[in-house]
Amino acid sequence: MSTHKIITIILIILAIFLGVSVYKQNKQGTLIVPTASVTTPSLATSTPIKISEIFPKQISLSSLNYFEFSDGTVLSLKQVNDSRCASNVNCIWAGNVIVVFNLKKGNANERFELKFGTGAENSQFTYGDYKIKIINVFPDKGVENKITTQKDYKVTILISK
């Protein structure tokens, strides 16, 4: 057998081995992606962020606070779905974060999602004259299999007019 064929076979075996080691599969062969997805506490236990009406502004939201617009509408963080690649793993795709927000004015509630990370460059939501966009999510995805709870997340958003 020629050296070229041996090297090709070794490279194929190595590629298969690395591919299998990167992905965790269950018995049906479907991909399992570890995510953190937890519902936040109610607004009754949260603290409002009171900031002047000067825009644009950056606000850091967590499960423990919310932002109140001048018209009384409350913006809060409801859920964080984090599918980013762990820092100690080689991934084909870096993943992203989908954050569910809630807008509440009186008895009316509106939920919306924003993405952050791969493929989310233009993800923004418009509320009246305001545009809302995620500019950062903390913590970064840590070591594989480490559980990040909802209380650990801080989502920095940009609100502009």
Image (cartoon, rainbow, N blue to C red):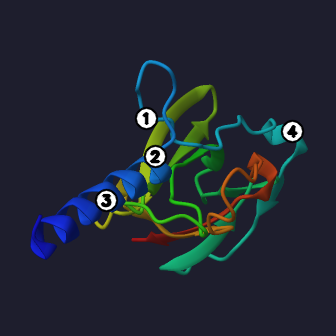
Residue drawn at the location 41% of the way across and 63% of the way down: 94
Q: Nearer the viewer, mark 1 or mark 4?
A: 1
Q: Residue furthest top?
A: 28
Image check: 109 left or right of 22?
Answer: right
Residue 23 bears which disc, if any?
2
In the image, which disc is placed on residue 15? 3
Q: Amino acid at mark 1?
A: Leu
Q: Secondary structure at mark 1?
A: loop
The residue sitting at 80% across, 35% down in the picture is 42
Residue named by callout 1? 31
Left or right of 107? Residue 124 is left
Label 1 vs 4, first from the N-terminus: 1
- Mark 3: few, some, or many residues within 10 Å (few <14, many ≥20)? few
In the image, taking residue 160 as reference, residue 156 lies left or right, namely right
**Label 4 element class:** helix
For marks 4 and 2, give the one nearer the viewer. Answer: 2
Position of the C terminus, as image quadrant, is bottom left
Q: Amino acid at mark 3?
A: Ala
